[in-house]
Image: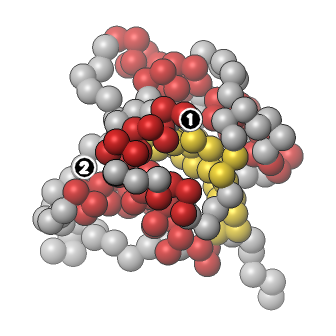
Amino acid sequence: MQTPPGKKIVLAVTGASGSVYAQVLLRKLESLSAQIESVGIVMSDNAREVWKHEIGDTSYSGFKFPVYDKNDFSAPFASGSARYDTMIVCPCSMGTLARIAGGISNDLTTRAADVMLKERRRLILVTRDTPLNLIHINNMKTVTEAGAIVCPASPSFYSRPESIEDVALTVIDRVIDLCGLNQDTFRWGNI
């Protein structure tokens, strides 16, 4: 019997604060690579700057996944025919959320998100900003009605995290579950 192909995942990293979420997610995806056929990464210029400021290095370029330019519309996930099944925007800025909600495909991130929505595939937006204004809330409503999943970067503390990375992992484990990947993680009820 032939093994089914792994997941094809797009990760977009925007300039919202929360680079640690993207870093922890990339590490987690590497650890689950047996379940993944491919991962493509796109980062905004602001994402790179925020990463350097918050993480203190340029380790975003050290992961084993290919990184595409923010304006590279020839990237495979810019078309539905490439059959990427999941896109994660982590962290997702309110500006990116607004462009996705408005159907504005002005860069590779928003084009890939538009592809996910039109193909009825999984789009997970890990929003991080707080507080929210009514425009943000309405944009979240719009993308949810279009089929996206808004997964705010709201950590949990049931597992008693001991570091910033552990706190971020409580969010990323939820994202991994939403992707449909199998993982060994803290589960409520297994205390």
Residue 48 in the figure: left or right of residue 134: right
Question: Could you tell me which quadrant the N terminus lies in?
Answer: bottom right
Of 144 and 78, nearer the camera is 78
Q: On screen, 125 above or below 34?
A: above
Residue placed at 53% from the left, 70% from the top?
30
Q: Give the colour scheme of this rendering.
A: secondary structure
Q: Secondary structure at mark 1?
A: loop
**81 w.r.t. 138: above or below:** below
Relative depth, front residue between 97 and 121 = 97
Q: Quadrant of residue 168?
A: bottom left
On the question of residue 145 being in view, the answer is no
Amino acid at pointer 2: Pro
Q: Which residue is mark 1?
A: 44
Q: Secondary structure at mark 2?
A: loop
Q: Is residue 14 left or right of residue 104?
A: left
Label 1 Cα neighbours within 10 Å, binned few <14 / some 14-19 / many ≥20: some
Q: Quadrant of the C terminus?
A: bottom left
Residue at (34% x, 11% y) in the render: 134
Q: Earlier in the sequence, mark 1 or mark 2?
A: 1
Res. 33 image quadrant: bottom right
Circle 2 Cα neighbour tier, 10 Å, few/some/many (<14 / 14–19 / ≥20): some
Q: Residue at x 79, y 35 (%)?
A: 73
Vertical placement of residue 34 versus 27, above or below? below
Residue 64 appearing in the image: yes
Residue denoted by label 2: 155
Residue 109 placement, left or right of 19 = right
Point out which mark residue 143 bears. none
